[in-house]
Image: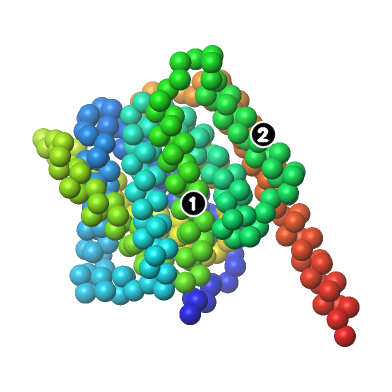
Amino acid sequence: MALKPPAPDAMKGIGLMCLALAFFSCLDTTAKYMGTVVELPVTQVVWLRFVSQFFLIVLITGIVAIPRLLRTQRFGHQLLRSSLMLGSTLMNFMALKHLRLDQTQTVYFLAPFVVALLSGPFLGEWVGWRRMIAILVGFCGILVVVRPGSVPFEPALLFAFGSMLCYATFMLLTRYLAAFDAPEVTLFYSLIAGTFIMGPIAMVDWVWPHHWSTWLLLLSMGFWGGLGHYIFIIAYRYAPASTLAPFIYLGLITHTAGGYLVFGQVPDQWTLIGASIVIASGVYLLYRERVTIEARKRAEAAKTATTP
């Protein structure tokens, strides 16, 4: 039986999405600091990101709440979403060791376009030729950032693209599961793969942090990630994906701020130009989606009016 959704509130959903993006920026900035400044293994940083959030949830809800958190109407979908979160996080942290925060975030801007493409086979919502052109233009914006042939190819970009693909599918499943499971259930399942699969892998090349501040930063990733993803899930219960998707672009501002304040990095002109192209294409994609929705509503209203 599906959960009864709360009353739609687009502004509340948008506000929650913006807050979640700010927390995600804190998470990525901390992960990059751990990998590049402290020089901890990526597998260790990834596992501590998940396990710290896992124990935070257990601490807040209590051990007796675990059976309730494991009770889901879509077990297979929850495990798939959890695996996608692990894949996205692992590849994102690997990319962050070599790329600026604004570069990885710009690649993530392709996620709404991938969501639009996957909506066809997953949801039966196929894109028209106008939106397909917008998707191609958005991809061209990423080519401006990468500039193949003009600069040496950075292999870490492959990790960024892989992370983005996992994240796009993760977004689709988040919206799907919002109608069946409570947010805390979906949040708890998000940690299963990262906590129990990454543990043994992290032990292989484990490096013990010696300073208390390093431990504090590592544990803070569970806070940023946990609260961010909880708010992220709640946002989708107040507003549809089509409304929230464009606000992912605010992540460029928050990630750029983190890169500048912590690492003194600023985006180059090609990243800004490419990001502008992708954002413009994404805004048009949203416009076409709303036009399609309005046309469908008018057609249904006309059909209802003519039905005897």
Q: Quadrant of residue 95?
A: top left
Q: Earlier in the sequence, mark 2 or mark 1?
A: 2
Report the residue at 82% width, 77% height from top.
304
Residue 37 screen position, x and y as percent: 25, 27
User: Where is the C terminus found, in terms of image quarters?
Assistant: bottom right
| Residue 169: image tag | 1
How crowded pointer 1 is (Cα within 10 Å; few <14, some 14-19, many 20+) is rated as: many
Query: Is residue 97 among what the camera can see?
Result: yes
Report the residue at 47% width, 59% height from top.
174
| Residue 154: image tag | none
Report the residue at 36% width, 53% height from top.
83
Q: Quadrant of residue 187?
A: bottom left
Query: Is residue 260 among what the camera can see?
Result: no
Q: Is residue 227 above or below residue 97?
A: below
How crowded pointer 2 is (Cα within 10 Å; few <14, some 14-19, many 20+) is rated as: some
Amino acid at dot 2: Val
Residue 31 screen position, x and y as percent: 31, 37
Amino acid at dot 1: Thr
Rounded to the nearest angstrom, the CA distance separating label 2 from label 1 is 21 Å
Secondary structure of the residue carrying numbered label 2: helix
Q: Indicate left or right for 80 with 179 as reference.
A: left
Q: Nearer the viewer, residue 155 or 121?
A: 121
Q: Is residue 149 above or below residue 130?
A: above
Q: Nearer the viewer, residue 169 or 246?
A: 169
Identify the residue under disc 2.
Answer: 137
Residue 54 screen position, x and y as percent: 25, 57
Residue 155 screen position, x and y as percent: 40, 25
Q: Is residue 169 above or below residue 62?
A: above
Q: Residue furthest front?
A: 121
